[in-house]
Image: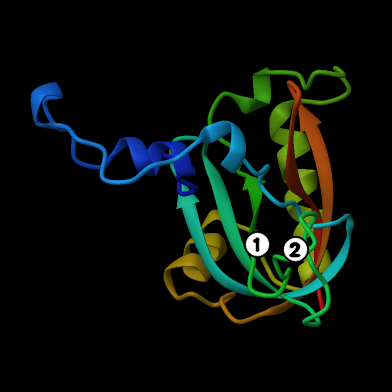
Amino acid sequence: MSIEKDEREAIQDEDIAEPADFKFDTEFNVDEEFKPVPLIPNGRYEGNVTNVKFDPSSFALVWEITLVADSDVTMSDGETPVNGNVVYYRNWLPKAGDESIRTKTGKMTKRQAKINMLKEFSKNMQISMNTPQEIMNGVNNQEWVGLSVLVTVEIREWEGRFSNNVKEITAA
């Protein structure tokens, strides 16, 4: 299961009642109350690494960054502050078999692409991720938690839905 549990999954995991036992405890009108999820405007923000974990289902390292912004910087709704929002970034880790699969462009293997991305990321972050052991130690010892970073955030569209995407993280 992914580290990032979306709101839909969290709500669906709540207790389930039998139809005869269920009663609404509040009134609502979806059409009147709907608000799109506020988005962080495109830009570069200061942040702090607040967690780094493995996501075994996608064989990735997931970085949790809490943004730090001036109080007048708000999200797309004009009221939610950017300060304190959490964004995620993934490092895709090489796995067995990647050396025989080409990337979509066909320029290199998935293994080589992942190695190249890890090299660029670790250089930008000024940390060492040279071997699986160094990555394991970094995560297990929480060596990277607390690092100050600069995060490039963008709004992206996928299948008609808009969301934030972390394009790049660098050491502050």
Q: Position of residue 108 (x, y in %)?
A: 83, 26
Q: Nearer the viewer, residue 29 or 9?
A: 29
In the picture of the structure, the residue carrying the numbered disc 2 is 122
Residue 150 place in picture, x, y as percent: 82, 71
Which residue is at the front of the view, 106 or 151?
A: 151
Q: Residue at x 49, y 75 (%)?
A: 142
How far separated are the C-alphas under marks 1 and 2?
Answer: 6 Å
- At 59% across and 74% down in the image, what residue appears? 144
Q: Position of residue 17 (x, y in %)?
A: 14, 32
The mark total stands at 2
Amino acid type, residue under disc 1 in the picture: Met
Residues 136 and 131: in front is: 136
Query: Which image quadrant: the N terminus?
Result: top left
- On screen, residue 70 above or below 28: below
**Secondary structure of the residue carrying numbered label 1:** loop
Quarter where residue 135 is shown: bottom right
What is the three-letter code of the residue carrying label 2?
Ser
Tell me the quadrant of the picture where the C terminus can be found. bottom right
Compared to residue 63, the image places residue 72 above or below, namely below
- Which residue is depicted at the point 65% across and 44% down? 35
Residue 107 horizontal/vertical position (percent): 89, 23
Nearer to us in this view, 87 or 58: 87
Mark 1 touching mark 2, by CB under 8 A? yes
Say which residue label 1 marks.
129
**SS at mark 2?**
helix
- Label 2 Cα crowd, 10 Å radius (few <14 / some 14-19 / many 20+): some
State whether residue 76 is above or below residue 22. below
The quarter of the displayed image where residue 127 is located: bottom right
Residue at the image position 74 percent from the left and 47 percent from the top? 164
Mark 1: few/some/many CA within 10 Å (<14, 14-19, 20+): some
Query: Looking at the rendered structure, which numbered label has been put on residue 24?
Result: none
